[in-house]
Amino acid sequence: MNMTTRYHINDAEIIHELIDGEVMLLNLTNGNYFSLDNVGVIIWEMISQNCTVEVLIEAIAGFDSANKDSMEAAIRQVVAQMIEEGLIIPVENDATFNRKDIIKSIDTRLRDGSIQFITPVLHMYKDIQEKYAHPAGVKAV
C-alpha cells in the first residue's frame, strides 16, 4: 500500500451509514456486513474526503507518541483490510484536501473525547443478525 495513494469509498458496491458513532457498511456484491467505531470512524470519514493514508497516520498515530508505532501499524492494517474487502478503492484524481484542517479536525475529536483513541478494527459479519446476537445466545426481540 502506497501511503500517498488516495482511496475512495467503493460507492458502486458499498452502502454505508454512520449510526450512533459507528459506521455500518454493507457490501452489495457478497452480502457481508462490516462496522468501524472509534478511530475507525475517523479513518472512514477522512478517506471519503480524499485524505491520504500518510495524513491519517500523521494525525491519529501522532496523537499518542507513546503508542505511535502500534497505531501506525493498526491504521495500515485496517486500511489494507478495507482494500482487500473491496470497501475502498484507489483513485487517480488530484482532488485536494487541506492537510492542516484534517489534522486539526482529527486532533480536536480525539482530545474532546467524541472519538476514543482505541486501535481501529474492521469488524466483519456474514449477516446483520450475527452483529446483534445476544452474548448469551439469546436472540434479542
Image (cartoon, rainbow, N blue to C red):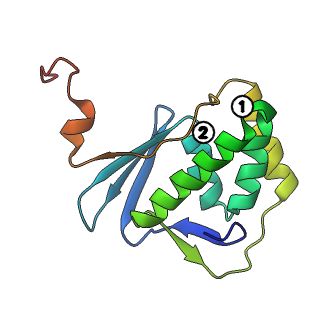
For marks 2 and 1, give the CA distance.
8 Å
Is mark 2 in CB contact (under 8 Å) with mark 1?
no
* Residue farthest to the bottom, as pictured: 92
* Residue 110 x, y percent position in the rendering: 72, 31
Who's the residue at 66% across and 60% down the image?
A: 49
* Residue 138 x, y percent position in the rendering: 12, 19
Task: Count residues near mark 1 (Cα–Cα under 10 Å), then give few for <14, some for 14-19, many for 20+.
Answer: some
Image position of 113 (left or right of 38): right
Residue 134, above or below 99? above
Q: Dividing the image into 4 quarters, which one contains the C terminus?
A: top left
Who's the residue at 60% across and 39% down the image?
A: 39
Residue 45, above or below 60? below
Image position of 130 (left or right of 114): left
* Residue farthest to the right, as pictured: 100
Picture disc at residue 110: 1
Under circle 2, the secondary element is helix
Who's the residue at 33% across and 55% down the image?
A: 26
Give the residue type at disc 2: Val
**Disc 2 designates what residue?**
39
Between 66 and 130, the one lying in front of the other is 66
